[in-house]
Image: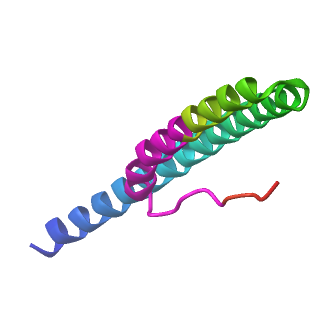
């Protein structure tokens, strides 16, 4: 019985270490994706701001609508990522101020 228990514990530790390693890999991939999305969002925002600086009042309204859409998309992406990050160890990527 003791041998079975020790083998079970060893198998459990092995499975746990493999799961932890995979969770770290997934976390790194998620961080890269979020970083890329953040860079793209910043670039798009910069273009929209430049557009607004040159535009009319009507164009400013259009810019506002586009910014709202972008914000909603980013919130949806963050909401989708939050459960996956919790499952991967409860850690979410830190927010970097720009």
Residue 44 belongs to magenta span:
no
The residue positioned farthest toward the front in the image shown: 57
Indicate left or right for 1 with 57 as reference.
Answer: left
Image spot of residue 49 (x, y percent): 83, 34
Indicate left or right for 58 with 50 as reference.
Answer: left
The residue under the point 45% across, 40% down is 76
Image spot of residue 78 (x, y percent): 50, 46
The residue under the point 63% across, 45% down is 31
Q: Is 27 rendered above or below residue 32?
A: below
The residue under the point 70% across, 40% down is 38
Q: Quadrant of residue 96?
A: bottom right
The residue under the point 55% across, 51% down is 24
**Camera-side residue: 44 or 26?**
44
Tell me where the magenta segment starts and ends, as one range: 72-94
**Camera-side residue: 73 or 82?**
73
Q: Quadrant of residue 70?
A: top right
């Amino acid at each position: 019985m003791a041998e079975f228990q020790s083998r079970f514990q060893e198998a459990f530790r092995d499975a746990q270490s493999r799961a932890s390693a995979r969770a770290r890999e997934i976390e790194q991939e998620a961080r890269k994706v979020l970083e890329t999305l953040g860079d793209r969002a910043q670039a798009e925002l910069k273009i929209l701001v430049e557009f607004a600086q040159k535009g009319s009042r009507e164009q400013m309204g259009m810019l506002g609508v586009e910014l709202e859409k972008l914000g909603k998309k980013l919130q949806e992406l963050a909401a989708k990522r939050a459960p996956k990050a919790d499952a991967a160890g409860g850690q979410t990527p830190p927010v970097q101020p720009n």
